[in-house]
Amino acid sequence: MAQKNTPTREFLKGLWDENPVLRMLIGLCPTLAVTNSAINGFSMGLAVIFTLVMSSLIISSARKIIPKEVRIPTFIIVIATFVTIADKLLAAYFPEISKALGPFVPLIVVNCIILARQEAFASKNPPGRATLDALGMSIGFTLTLTILGSIRELIGVGTIFTIQIMPDNFEPWMVMVLQPGAFITLGLMIGLSNWLNARRAK
Amino acid sequence: MFNLLVIFLSAVLVNNYVLVNFLGICPFVGVSKKIGPSVSMGLATTFVMTLASAVAWLLNKYILEGLNLQFLQTVSFILVIASLVQLVEMFIKKVSRPLYDALGIFLPLITTNCAILGVALFLVLKQYNFVESIVFGFSAGVGFTLAIVIMAGIREELELADVPRYFKGAPITLIVAGCLALAFMGFSGLI
């Protein structure tokens, strides 16, 4: 993949070219589950930014002392530790959001984005680069979740970040905030990003 | 007994793991191309889920609650699941070679299937007892199998359909899953 990237590229690639959700199709479970409103998607994104950046920093700093054979369990323990910290912080300071996200915060441990970045990037690159990569990837993830959450909230309830957008006579499409809306909106978003990419390549 | 039936129906149909709770989406999108592999994946997942729910319940009840270490839940569950999968893999390889070959690479992949950790976290959240937990784990697995096999059936037909170019693959799969989820919403009045 990207060996000789400039630091800026390293950061930017996560936003679009290698966007974890839209281009690589990983981390779909939280993407679908928590985006019934913009604020939920955004908070999930923040939790992932924290976990991914901290794990990448620690793992790339320790990459020379982690034996190859047990690297996956090591990664998982480091990730699980930061997820627990994020989970407890959310529960202590933002109990409502923590309640809305439910078991999906501890489930960040098995979010493939985080393990995939450790395996593909942080375990092979110096801490500075790994942090940039982690930041780019997780911000790309957060943006995607916030946009998906905003679309669903806008059509499903008529608001974005609980601010009324739609006119009063707008009849909300309840189905958008329920499960089918998640699948269908994400499917359309991925299709749209395929189309944009194909157009840009021309 | 009735209680267990309710748990079973609720996990398989009403709160289907994949279509309602959004767990195990990665294998659901990734492995559901053909019916055969989907069935194997479903069976392997059901097997591990049932075992994992039993182990997670015991671990939570006697070690974490006993020592007041609930904050270690996430870390300890994921470790137990990872080692459990490894153990099951070695055991099946020794005992039944044909089964091992049939499950193939799906077994190790299950470790990172969020559905397994999801089951463990849910059964603590719902405060099930030991038997209920095992039934819950098993039914969640059956629900996963049901969803992934239905999806594989639809996708085999989709191969022949004229899908717009940019929607081939994942986008159309997700949209079809949305329609399936819509259908499963019809079960919500069941219990």
Image: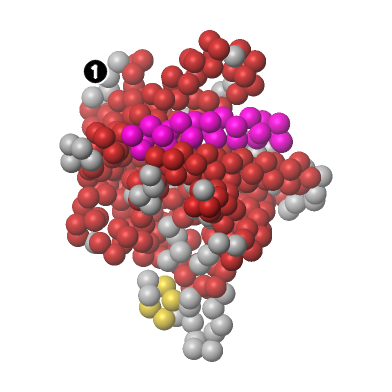
Q: Which residue is drawn at 25% across and 61% down?
A: A95
Q: In which quarter of the image is residue B118?
A: top left
Q: Residue furthest bottom?
A: A169
Q: Is residue A55 visible?
A: no
Q: Is residue B53 magenta?
A: yes
Q: Nearer the viewer, residue B114 or B45?
A: B45
Q: In which quarter of the image is residue A136?
A: top left
Q: In this view, does A91 lie to the left or right of A180?
A: left
- The image position of residue A180, as x and y in percent, is 58, 61
- Mostly what secondary structure, the magenta segment? helix
Q: In which quarter of the image is residue B144?
A: top right
Q: In this view, does A12 lie above or below A173?
A: above
Q: Can residue B111 be seen in this view?
A: yes
Q: Mark 1 — residue?
A: A65
Q: Which residue is drawn at 43% across and 57% down?
A: A34
- The image position of residue B84, as x and y in percent, is 41, 25
Q: Which of B31 and B81 is in front in this view?
A: B81
Q: Which residue is drawn at 19% across and 60% down?
A: A93
Q: Residue furthest front?
A: B1
Local packing at callout 1 (Cα closer than 10 Å; few below 14, some 14-19, many 20+) is few
Q: Please state the chain letter of the residue tagged with numbered disc 1 in the rendered image.
A: A
Q: Is residue A28 left or right of residue B98?
A: left
Badge 1 marks a residue whose secondary structure is loop
Q: Does the magenta stretch include residue A49?
A: no
Q: Which of B11 and B62 is in front in this view?
A: B62
Q: Which residue is drawn at 54% across and 89% down?
A: A169
> Which residues, given as a range, are shown in magenta?
B34-58
